[in-house]
Every structure is written in C-alpha cells, then in structure tokens.
C-alpha cells in the first residue's frame, strides 16, 4: 500500500483496565505503575503488547528515584587512593535511567509533546489524497 499512512490504534483496541504492577518491580516502580496506569487506561491507548514498554518505563523511574535517595544519603563525590575525586557512580546510573524515562514517556504519550502529536494525527481516512495511490 504505497502512499498510505498506517491507521492509528482505535480506542476499542486499547486496554480499559491495566493489570497490577509486576511483583518484581521495586516499590518506587510499582508506585509509578499505579500512577501512570490510571492515566493510560483512561486514554485506552495501550494494548497487551505495550505492557513491556510500561514495565521498562516504570523500572527506569524506580531506578532514578533509588539513585536520588542514594545520592541524598551520601557524598556526591567519591575518592579513592588511585584517582582524583569523581562523581558518585549513582550519577551515571541515574543519567541513563533518566534517558530511558524520557524515551519511554514519549512513546507512552506521557509528555506534552507526545500528547500534542497524537492529537494532531489524522483520525482515519480523511486524507483527500488517500485514494490516489501516489
């Protein structure tokens, strides 16, 4: 089907109620699952196949929060006998987790920009050039 855009997921395909958080998630990640699952269920944009993305998003949010707690409890700089002071290793873990949070939040429609994009997307075959096979 050259020249045609893929059809958007209809609300009928989306889950109206999401399952509870996986048992293996950290308490911080479970809290985020509960918070976000209400929003996503209301929008009905997730399918059963999208739950792995939600798991990864929540896992990354949990990692960010755990790293923040670790950094708040201890020194921000680590010193060793062989090297100059350097940032705590949790900074690197937190930075990578924050990158994943941004990526998955966008994919799940949890950012203002991603919501605006989905609202502006065409809602069917209203494209006046759809039948021209260009």
Image (spheres, helix red, strand yellow):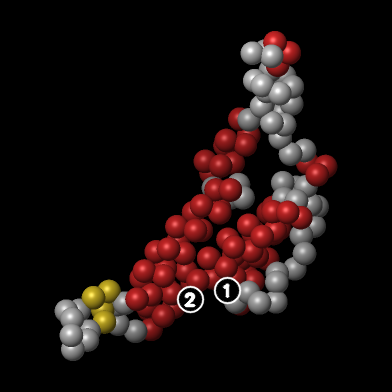
At x 72%, y 31%, the residue is 7
Q: Position of residue 75 (x, y in %)?
A: 30, 82
Identify the image quadrant of residue 11: top right
Q: Secondary structure at mark 1?
A: helix
Marks 1 and 2, the one that precedes in the sequence = 1
Q: Which residue is disc 1 drawn over?
A: 28
Count numbered badges in the picture. 2
Q: Which residue is disc 2 drawn over?
A: 66
View extreme (top): residue:
132
Q: CA distance from mark 1 to mark 2?
A: 8 Å
Vertical comparison of 89 with 116: above or below: below
Mark linked to residue 134: none
Identify the image quadrant of residue 82: bottom left
At x 73%, y 54%, the residue is 49
1 left or right, relative to 65: right
View extreme (right): residue:
12
Q: Secondary structure at mark 2?
A: helix
61 left or right, relative to 22: left
Vertical comparison of 33 with 50: above or below: below
Q: Quadrant of the N terminus?
A: top right
Crowd band around label 2 with a 10 angstrom C-alpha radius: few (<14), some (14–19), many (20+):
some
Vertical comparison of 52 with 23: above or below: above
At x 62%, y 36%, the residue is 118
| Cβ–Cβ under 8 Å for marks 1 and 2 | yes
């Amino acid at each position: 089907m050259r020249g045609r855009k893929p059809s958007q997921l209809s609300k009928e395909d989306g889950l109206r109620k999401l399952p509870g958080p996986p048992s293996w998630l950290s308490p911080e990640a479970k809290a985020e699952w509960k918070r976000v699952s209400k929003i996503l269920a209301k929008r009905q944009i997730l399918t059963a196949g999208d739950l792995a993305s939600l798991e990864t998003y929540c896992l990354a949010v949990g990692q960010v929060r755990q790293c923040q707690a670790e950094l708040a409890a201890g020194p921000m700089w680590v010193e060793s006998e062989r090297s100059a002071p350097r940032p705590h290793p949790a900074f690197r873990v937190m930075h990578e987790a924050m990158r994943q949070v941004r990526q998955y939040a966008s994919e799940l429609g949890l950012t203002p920009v991603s919501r605006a994009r989905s609202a502006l997307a065409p809602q069917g075959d209203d494209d006046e050039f759809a039948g021209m096979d260009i």
